[in-house]
Amino acid sequence: MLSPPLQITDAARQAGALAMRDVWRASELAVSRATTMVTGHVQLDQELPNKGWPRSELVELLVQRHGIGEMQLLKPSLASLSQKQRIAFVQPPYLPYSMACRSWNMNDKNLLWLRPQSSADALWSAEQILKNGGCGAVVLWQSNVRPEALRRLHLAAQATDTWIWLIRPLASAADSSVSPLRIALRPAHGGVSADIIKRRGPTCEAPLFVPLIDMPAGRRLFDKDHEAPIKRAPATTSARSLAAALV
């Protein structure tokens, strides 16, 4: 005698799906076992999967122009990480300003400044830092990044316990990207307007206003006119030079 077909109820299907790692409903923000770090901005945390910046994943910040508050958005996270781990700034648009780092409660002894000679060298350096695992976080600035380079960065990030933020022009929002989290930033009075254009979860209906208390006044982390004694890596991209910079 043939057995009757197995009946699977909707409740069983939902329970099975929720038990699977990294599975979420399209109408809800993703909740997974991935490690995250709170951004320090309540409004933003509420709109991010797992309530914070994801570790081991490429995060893109797309800015209308440099200096609109993107570094102040990262300030709480960078200040916390720099206490015990190195942070690499790769090809920033301006010179790092050591006094501002200290005023932001960042340990400037754990800040590494890399100024490669080309975009290709900068991407290579960031990828090697991720593979090396010697830094707790990487902040990389790039204008034009090919999809293959983005994929390599994301794969390298997935294999390490490092936070990585890629800062790109706002026009890059129209480009496809493997990054699971992309946020477009525009200037706003007293803060920034953050438009989450890609996340694991439903579409963010409207941009968020994120207040930044240091926006009206205060020193910038990067300054055109000041150069401070932040440890700078050699401009070459040899493996020996990069290894020496991470010592």
Image (cartoon, rainbow, N blue to C red):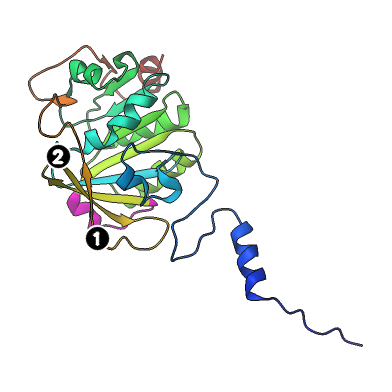
Q: Foreground residue, 119 or 181? A: 181
* Horizontal side of residue 192 vs 127, given as left or right: left
Residue 158 pos. (x, y %): 48, 41
Q: Residue at x 63, y 75 (%)?
A: 10
Check if residue 174 falls in the magenta segment. yes
Residue type highlighted by circle 1: Ala
Up the image or down, 187 lies above or below 9; here it is above
Residue sticking out furthest to the left:
225
**Sequence-first tag of 1 and 2:** 2
Q: Which residue is mark 2?
A: 68
Q: Foreground residue, 72 or 163? A: 72
Q: Residue at x 55, y 45 (%)?
A: 33
Magenta span: 170-180
Q: Which residue is mark 1?
A: 206
Residue type highlighted by circle 2: Ile
Q: Residue at x 32, y 16 (%)?
A: 107
Label 1 Cα neighbours within 10 Å, binned few <14 / some 14-19 / many ≥20: few
Q: Secondary structure at mark 1?
A: loop
- Frontmost of labels 1 and 2 is 1
Residue 134 pos. (x, y %): 44, 23
Residue 225 pos. (x, y %): 7, 20
